[in-house]
Amino acid sequence: METHSGSRRMFLKTGIGVTASQCFPGLAVAQGSSGPRLEWQQFKTTSQYPAFVNAIATMRSNTNQASPGSLSYWSNVHVNTCPHGVPYFISWHRGYLYHFEQQLRSVSGNPYLTLPYWNYYSYATLPAEFTDPAPTNPLYVPRQSSNVYGALSMAPFASAVRNFQRGKSNAFEPSIEDVHNPIHDLIGGVMSTMQSPLDPIFFLHHASIDRLTHAWSLLAGKTMPKSANPYSSTNSDAYWAGNHLYATGLSIERYKTRIPSWLGTTYASNTVPTALPPAPAASAARAALLQRPPFRSFRTVAGRRLSNTRRSVSGVAQVPFDEQSVSVLLRLAKSDAAELARVVALCRDGGEPDVRADVRADIRQMPGMIKLVFDNVSVGAAAKKGGFFYALYLDMPAVVESQAARDASLIGTLGAFQIAAAAHHGTPRIEFDVSYLLARQERVNFTELALSWVRVDGDRPPAGKAILANEIRVELAFAPDDAHGLSGDAEDIERQHL
């Protein structure tokens, strides 16, 4: 495994507005007019396939991490600047793929080369070309699993998911990230780390996420922040103001990542999946037996004020995650349960669970969000290779009889990649806004919340304790966090995760 040297600050020291072609010799001539990005099964039958394979081989063999012609350079970009679990996850990666595709064209000498995508909603198994361990195959790296069926969900494409960005109710960005993350986890190997671009399948995976995002945005009733082309503060949403930063001299104006065509990119298909692919025998057997795991007891943690805007109302400490699936009861005082009920009532009435400017004086009395927080989470040495994840549920039925019943209680996922991304941004803490999930469950009593985690294994999962959570707690957030409030200065938001 290559190490990633160099200071993060030095890597980011950049003058915004410098174009990629100025900083990447030969890149401008590589920007040709190309056809659409193709799904791998079609792509490999075209004349572009050998150019792609040769370009990946060339970039893997280039050991100069300072050279954009090396794969390690692009891994460093990801390690140092990518946002995960925070705003701009999708648009940052859209610009990242654009710049990487230009570099592929430069390395290959083919100005029409496009990135392929892997449609795992049709082919849940890794393409065979990526699993051949022949020494001459540049698409192969060691991995833990070849099938990602267990990571797939139809939840991002549900009719209720109508808003785009994280921080909004019923938002697509966090929902599709809950598909993105466990795919990293199941494949494992370097894909379960922030150095994941060292695995060539990374780029097909993110091209698939990018295509799914665009296809979702074209559906009726879906809303994305508006932008003119070019961006104008008078008729564009502030969400698109500013720039995404990648490396020295390498940036992109955010608004250009709103639509693939504004970057000169199209996809061969703009449809969303309507069903999951056929399940492998083992996955089908697990799905047929999906039941709420047995309850266990852990040391409780008293509720407490965490800051001026956040308060813990229930928690458990020193919670290990191993091969077993487990449930735990999180008990709340009646007064705290009443506050949860107020937030849920706002959600059911169609209001945003936040605090308006004219009532900020009452911030301590008016909670805005209900969050489930996994604080100070660590991953065991063997588990860092991935090959597993945990599906998280809130008030899971005793027996899950349908996909709809599963989605009604599914919070998200927890795995090695997600924890590595959280640690990359500071303290390894994973947060889930469960306000609208509780609202959809139509419950009225909030004195107890049942949290369950179901272990989902790939081909070679680790044994023993995989993850340790120092604390799992329910929080009341009295105002939107800066990381979720998208109405402020976009540059300030970006700086939080750089």
Image: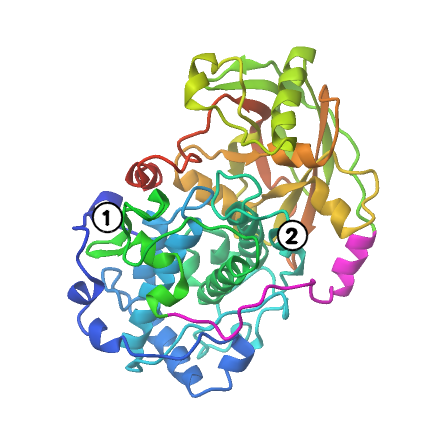
| Residue under numbered circle 2 | 158
- Sort mark 2 into few (<14), some (14-19) or many (20+) by Cα contacts within 10 Å: few
Q: Residue furthest front?
A: 234
33 left or right of 461?
Answer: left
User: Which residue is rendered at x = 79% and y = 47% of the image?
Assistant: 290
Q: CA distance from mark 1 to mark 2?
A: 38 Å
Exactly how many numbered labels are in the figure? 2
Q: Amino acid at mark 2?
A: Ala
- Which of discs 1 and 2 lies nearer the camera? The answer is 2
* Front residue of 412 and 243: 243
Q: Where's residue 124, x and y in %?
A: 63, 66
User: Which residue is rendered at x = 55% and y = 39% of the image?
Assistant: 169
Residue 276 sits inside the magenta stretch: yes
Residue 342 sits inside the magenta stretch: no
- Sort mark 1 into few (<14), some (14-19) or many (20+) by Cα contacts within 10 Å: some
Residue 288, quarter of the rendered image: bottom right
**Quick check: 357 above or below 456?**
above
Q: Where's residue 307, x and y in %?
A: 44, 17
The quarter of the rendered structure image containing the C terminus is top left
Residue 60, quarter of the rendered image: bottom left
**Quick check: 17 above or below 200?**
above
| Residue under numbered circle 1 | 12
Mark with earlier residue (1, 2): 1
Can residue 255 be seen?
A: yes
Q: Are marks 1 and 2 in contact (CB under 8 Å)?
A: no
Can residue 382 be seen?
A: no
* Front residue of 414 and 88: 88
Q: Regarding mark 1 in the picture, which secondary structure is present there?
A: helix
Q: Regarding mark 2 in the picture, which secondary structure is present there?
A: loop
Q: Where's residue 36, x and y in %?
A: 44, 76
**Quick check: 429 above or below 275?**
above
